[in-house]
C-alpha cells in the first residue's frame, strides 16, 4: 500500500510526540523529498521515456536524469553505444566512422557520432529522480517498500535536530536496512561495456619492433 505525503508525515510525528511546535511540516517534507531522491539514485527504481527528433549532434539531458538505460536513433534495433571521452576523441578527431553510432555525456548534454541527420527520431529511456512531493495527497514515485525507509530517515533527522544523536545514529541504521550501498557516479554514464574500437595495427603486437 502506497502512503501519501500527509500519511507519511503523520507517521514521522508519532514517535516524536511533536505536533509542529519544534519540527515543522516543511522540515519533514524537505527530509522526505531529499531521501526519496537518494533512494531513487541508489535503486534506479524510476525509469522514464522521452521521444523527439534531433536538430544537431547534441541533446540536452533531461532535468530529472540520473543514469542511462537505452537510447535509440531512428529505429529501435541498434542502440547508441556509450563510450568514454578518450574513445570519443579517438573516433571523432581522427574522422573515423565507427560501425555503430556512439555517444557520450559531456557538459550536461548527450553527444552522438557520427551526427544524426536533422529530424531523426529518437527514443530515450533513462533512470530518473522522483517528482517533488508538495501536496498532502502526493504519493512518492519510489517503490512502496521504500516508503518506510523514507519515514525512518525523516525521524532520524528530527532526532538530530533535537540533539538526540544516539537516536539519530540508530535511526539511520534502521533507514539503511534493505537499501543498496550508496552509488557513486557512473563512469562516463555508460550503461554497459563498449564493443567498438580500432583494429590493432602492425606495430601494436607484443613482439613488434619500434624504431
Image (spheres, rainbow, N blue to C red):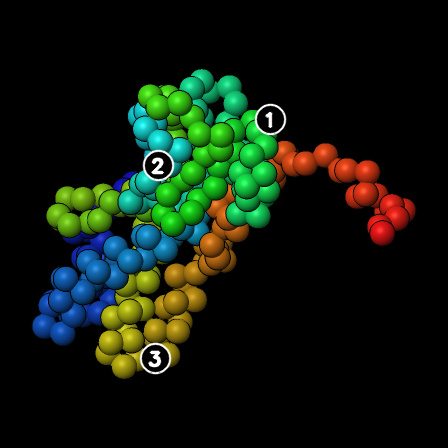
Q: Residue at x 39, y 61 (%)?
A: 175
State whether residue 10 is above or below residue 64.
below
Looking at marks 1 and 2 on the same chain, the residue that comes earlier in the sequence is marked by 2
* CA distance for labels 1 and 2: 21 Å
Measured as percent of width and height from the top left, residue 2 is found at 27, 42
Which numbered dot is residue 165?
A: 3
Looking at marks 1 and 3 on the same chain, the residue that comes earlier in the sequence is marked by 1
Specify the quadrant of the image occupied by residue 52: top left
Measured as percent of width and height from the top left, residue 74 is found at 42, 19
Question: Which residue is situated farthest in the bottom direction here?
Answer: 163
State the residue position of label 2: 59
* CA distance for labels 2 and 3: 46 Å
Measured as percent of width and height from the top left, residue 105 is found at 44, 44
State the residue position of label 1: 99
State whether residue 5 is above or below residue 14.
above
Density class for disc 1 (Cα within 10 Å; few <14, some 14-19, many ≥20) is: few
Residue 148 visible somewhere in the drawing: no
Seen in the image, is 118 located left or right of residue 18? right
Instruction: Name the foreground residue: 163 vs 51.
Output: 51
Instruction: Name the foreground residue: 199 vs 143.
Output: 199
Q: Secondary structure at mark 2?
A: strand
Q: Residue at x 26, y 57 (%)?
A: 32
State whether residue 16 is above or below residue 142.
below
Q: Secondary structure at mark 3?
A: helix
Q: Nearer the viewer, mark 2 or mark 3?
A: 2
State whether residue 155 is above or below residue 104.
below
Seen in the image, is 7 located left or right of residue 129? left
Instruction: Name the foreground residue: 26 vs 56.
Output: 56
Task: Report the number of discs.
Answer: 3
Density class for disc 2 (Cα within 10 Å; few <14, some 14-19, many ≥20) is: some
Q: Residue at x 13, y 67 (%)?
A: 24
Amino acid at each position: 500500500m502506497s502512503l501519501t505525503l500527509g500519511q507519511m508525515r503523520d507517521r514521522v510525528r508519532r514517535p516524536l510526540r511533536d505536533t509542529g511546535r519544534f519540527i515543522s511540516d516543511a522540515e519533514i517534507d524537505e527530509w522526505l523529498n531529499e531521501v526519496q531522491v537518494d533512494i531513487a539514485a541508489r535503486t534506479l527504481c524510476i525509469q522514464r521515456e522521452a521521444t523527439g527528433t534531433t536538430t544537431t549532434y547534441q541533446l540536452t539531458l533531461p532535468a530529472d536524469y540520473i543514469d542511462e538505460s537505452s537510447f535509440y536513433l531512428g529505429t529501435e534495433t541498434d542502440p547508441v553505444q556509450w563510450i568514454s571521452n578518450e574513445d570519443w576523441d579517438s573516433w571523432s578527431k581522427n574522422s573515423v566512422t565507427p560501425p555503430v553510432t556512439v555517444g557520450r555525456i559531456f557538459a550536461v548534454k548527450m553527444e552522438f557520432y557520427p551526427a544524426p541527420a536533422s529530424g531523426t527520431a529518437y527514443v530515450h529511456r533513462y533512470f530518473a529522480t522522483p517528482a517533488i512531493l508538495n501536496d498532502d495527497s502526493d504519493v512518492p514515485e519510489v517503490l512502496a517498500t521504500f516508503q518506510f525507509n523514507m519515514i525512518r530517515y525523516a525521524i532520524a533527522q528530527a532526532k538530530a535536530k533535537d540533539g538526540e544523536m544516539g537516536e539519530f545514529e540508530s535511526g539511520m541504521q534502521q533507514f539503511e536496512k534493505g537499501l543498496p550501498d550508496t552509488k557513486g557516479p557512473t563512469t562516463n554514464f555508460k550503461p554497459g561495456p563498449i564493443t567498438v574500437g580500432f583494429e590493432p595495427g602492425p606495430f601494436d603486437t607484443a613482439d613488434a619492433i619500434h624504431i
